[in-house]
């Protein structure tokens, strides 16, 4: 019984080991309120070029990574790929 309670209790070592970091409900609600106020103030600001405010990062959300290109070309095939490219005009 104790183990099941520790699994569900935020902030315990067992809960963090099984599910990762979870904020208590009041912290989650406070982050939502701050995000909503930031968006509301940004909308009322009236500046067309101002960037949209970012959310407060949550520990359980995965960070978005920007991926450029595709898989790397093996060294053995690089020279053939390079020679096949059209020369760029200077």
Image: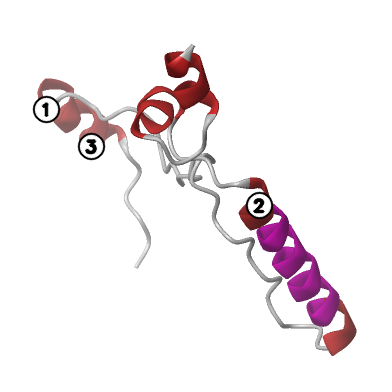
- Farthest residue in the front direction? 1
Number of the front mark, 2 or 1: 2
Asked whether, in this view, residue 15 is left or right of residue 44, the answer is left
Majority secondary structure in the magenta region: helix
**Residue 19 horizontal/vertical position (percent):** 46, 26
Q: Name the residue carrying label 2.
A: 28
Quadrant of image for the C terminus: bottom left
For this rendering, which residue is in front, 2 or 62?
A: 2
SS at circle 1: helix
Q: Is residue 37 magenta?
A: yes
Number of the front mark, 3 or 1: 1
- Which residue is pictured at 45% across the width and 45% down the height? 65
SS at circle 3: helix
Number of the front mark, 3 or 2: 2
Name the N-terminal-most of marks 2 and 1. 2
SS at circle 2: helix
- Which residue is pictured at 54% across the width and 41% down the height? 61
User: Within 10 Å of the Cα at label 3, are there few (<14), some (14-19), or many (20+) other Cα atoms?
Assistant: few
Q: Is residue 44 above or below residue 30?
A: below
Asked whether, in this view, residue 56 is left or right of residue 44, the answer is left
Q: Name the residue carrying label 1.
A: 75
For this rendering, which residue is in front, 18 or 88?
A: 18
For this rendering, which residue is in front, 89 or 46?
A: 46
Chain part drawn in magenta:
29-42
Q: Name the residue carrying label 3.
A: 82
Give the CA separation, mark 2 to mark 1: 49 Å
Disc count in the image? 3
């Amino acid at each position: 019984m104790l183990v099941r309670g520790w699994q569900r209790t935020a902030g315990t070592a067992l809960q963090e080991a099984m599910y990762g970091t979870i904020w208590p409900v009041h912290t989650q609600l406070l982050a939502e309120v701050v995000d909503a106020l930031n968006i509301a103030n940004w909308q009322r600001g009236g500046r067309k070029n101002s960037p949209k405010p970012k959310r407060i990062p949550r520990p359980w959300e995965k960070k978005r990574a920007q991926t450029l290109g595709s898989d790397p070309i093996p060294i053995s095939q690089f020279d053939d790929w390079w020679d096949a490219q059209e020369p760029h005009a200077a």
